[in-house]
Amino acid sequence: MKHVYYTSPFVPPVWIAAHGLKPCLMNVSARDTGTGTSPGECPYARAVINQASRRDDSLFVLTATCDQMRRAAEWLSLEFEQRRGKDEKAKDPYDLDSPVFLLNVPATWHSAARDRYRAELARLGRFLVRKGGRSPDASDLRESLRSGRLQLHVPHTDPVGVRTTAVPLAVVGGPLMEEHAELYRVIERNGGSVALNGSEGCERSQVTPGDASEFVRDPLGMLTALYFDSIGDAFRRPDSGLARWLVPRIEQRSIRGVVFYAYTWCDLWRAQYVSLAEAVKLPSLLLELGGEERLSAGTITRIQAFMESLR
Amino acid sequence: MNEAPARLSLAEWDVRYDTLRQRGLREAWYGGSLSRHVEHGDRRLLSLRFDNSPAALRLWNLLLTEEERLHAARAGGKKIVGAMKDLGTVPILAYAVPGLVAFYPDGAWWIPCLMEGSAGLLAKAGALGIDDTFCPVRAMLGAFETQRHFPIPDLLTCSVGATCDDFSAIAQRLEHMGHPIHWWEIPHRRPAEPGEEQTLLPTGATVAQSEIAFVARELERLRRVLQDLAGRSISLDDVSASIRAANVVRRLLCALRDAVYGSPCCPLPALEMLIAEVLPVHFCSDRSETEAVLRELLAEVVRRVHCGSGILPQSAVRLFWVNPVADLRIPRLVEDCGGRICGADYMFCHAQATIPENVPPLEALAMAALSDPMAGTAVDRGRWICREARRFGAEAMVISRIPGASHCATEGEIIRRVVTRELPHLPVIEFEVPSVADALLPTLQTRVEALIETVRLRKVKP
Ligand code: SF4
Ligand code: SF4
């Protein structure tokens, strides 16, 4: 079964599975940033390019949710073309042979944008069929829903567990490379407990399973409602969905501080820090993460100091 | 008044201005000596060189009086539209009716350079959480905060989707600061897939027709918002007329580019060309004046080409320039090093291409919006650059990176890749130019000199 790799919570794995292909969440590692990034390049996007370009016989669904990832998809597509000895002069990056699909997730929320997300999922379906998948029938849809492939879940971002004696914190940010999940452990080692997890692939981007018969009747309608209508993210305009998700949960869970993180050159998440910190009105810390394989000593010290100030 | 073309310092221009006045120079109402702008804070002018023609004087005065003219428009009862990011589309809708004036707050990009940082806009942006990991357009946040530059618009629009993350993030911050924004979407431009209809765009790229339909609907939403602001309807005929008027400006600019970049004698300095190239984006807040300025510049250039007189020796090495430079001293540096800019992609080439007049107007505007190099692939952009570089006989290329810009890292490399394939003998260099490049000027100069030397050596030893 062909593997289809993806990274974004806006790519419904259930839709890939319904086409008879295997959805695989890319486990992005700092080791994949390789020899480093060019000036201005997001290390996460670079790691995605490097990891994906090693997987020759797979498909990739990346999203145009940020400029860096959109261009990473183009880069990757060109890499594959070059490897196949194609003449770039005559080619578009996303020609029919490309194993890379760029899903255009609209930034705006209005109804035409919603229709567009739905149309993009249909276009993804056609790509999957062209690449060897099958057009899903009712039983494919039912089966893929039953197999629980609705969620994007990044296992390495699971907190150790909520301890009642610890200071309840929220962690908020975009994607997180495997090694950088160490920040959860550092928080926990220093008397904190991640009681609200706003990293990509965690609570913030989880969707609630819908009704199977509804899915069979209108799969794209249900996926649009589950993903497009409900996931707040830094790239959405307006970005009010993020605060709508964060602020009530902060109150419900008696959160006492928020740790934000953003990769170097990630404008979208970096800019969120100030706005969200204003919205939650709690002590906040912004961590800048690079492409290193360990959290830097400076980052660890900053977490320790922050925890100390909260205890 | 037909003196030989030359580049003058500000002080030299003052002398020339007096002479021209004595000889009966007729100016537009916003005219005057250039040095008066230094008193208003544009200190960078002291270190620039200016073309000596009255046409160039008018161009500079149009540019440097924009804030003043916007304040006057507001005082005269006009509503101000702050269009952000799309570069060239929203103003055409706004100028479809008389009561609206549109400009791009994005233009604050150049304020730190023009005022040599004295306005403190970048520091203000930093204090608002937008530090130097973002592109210099963050100066715009500072300008909104200080309210000492352009008037705060009555309506702000911002295109998102396939745009840079810098602008999207900065505009969102602006909205959180209490400036509501009408967001509209320009999606990533993709070609048609099997079974879909495909359309050729004015810049030569192709796009699936469904994308045009989507953007046309977005523009329809914008039309309604602008109607509400103007307090009157904006009919499709109004939009068509506005497109035709914009096309007059665009054609003039294209004629100017062809005449300047195509001529062996370099009839106009690169700095004046950079400013002229930006005019069609929003007509510097005055469409008819923009048209007049371009006509005058074109007439001057045609005259100079006819006489074979330029501002540089014909041996100047022909460089194609990619991306705008935030420090306005760079074009002069290139010329002083023995180069000349003979073609450029300053990221608003889509605002220079003629908008189709034979399709429904909102569809035509959607095609113009989707032609934005930002919306397409870097390969598309690279191909456009190669076509232009070939057309104007470029002998080398400079890709100037914009500090902090989310698109520059990967895009620059892809463009280079395309150029290396399509124009294998063209030397290409890439460097970053900050808003105030003082510390880097010697290095930049060395790199440009080395590039020019390479081209010269190749000419000697083919
Ligand atoms: S970390 Fe930020 S810049 Fe990097 S891919 Fe994700 S959203 Fe884009
Ligand atoms: S220069 Fe680049 S990063 Fe800056 S606003 Fe323009 S497109 Fe965006």
Image (cartoon, rainbow, N blue to C red):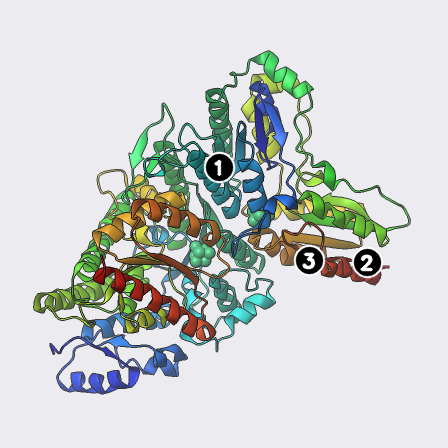
Left or right of A210 in this view: A115: left
Mark sitting earlier along the chain (2/1): 1
Residue B321 visible? The answer is: no
B413 lies above or below A158:
below
**Ligand 1 within 8 angstroms of badge 2 C-beta:** no
Q: Position of residue B364 (x, y in %)?
A: 29, 42
For the residue labelled by badge 2, is the local secondary structure a helix, a strand or a loop?
Answer: helix
The answer as to whether the residues below labels 2 and 1 share one chain is yes
Which residue is the site of mark 1? A104
Instruction: Read off the chain for label 2.
Output: A
Q: Position of residue B264 (x, y in %)?
A: 16, 63
Which residue is the site of mark 3? A286
* Residue lying at the far left of the rendered structure: B307
Q: Which class describes the residues within 10 Å of circle 3: few (<14), some (14-19), or many (20+)?
A: many
Which residue is the site of mark 2? A307
Q: Nearer the viewer, residue B159 or A192?
A: A192
Mark sitting earlier along the chain (1/3): 1
Q: Which class describes the residues within 10 Å of circle 2: few (<14), some (14-19), or many (20+)?
A: many
Instruction: Read off the chain for label 3.
Output: A
Instruction: Read off the chain for label 1.
Output: A
Q: Mark 2 to mark 1: distance in Å?
A: 39 Å
Q: Residue at x 53, y 27 (%)?
A: A57
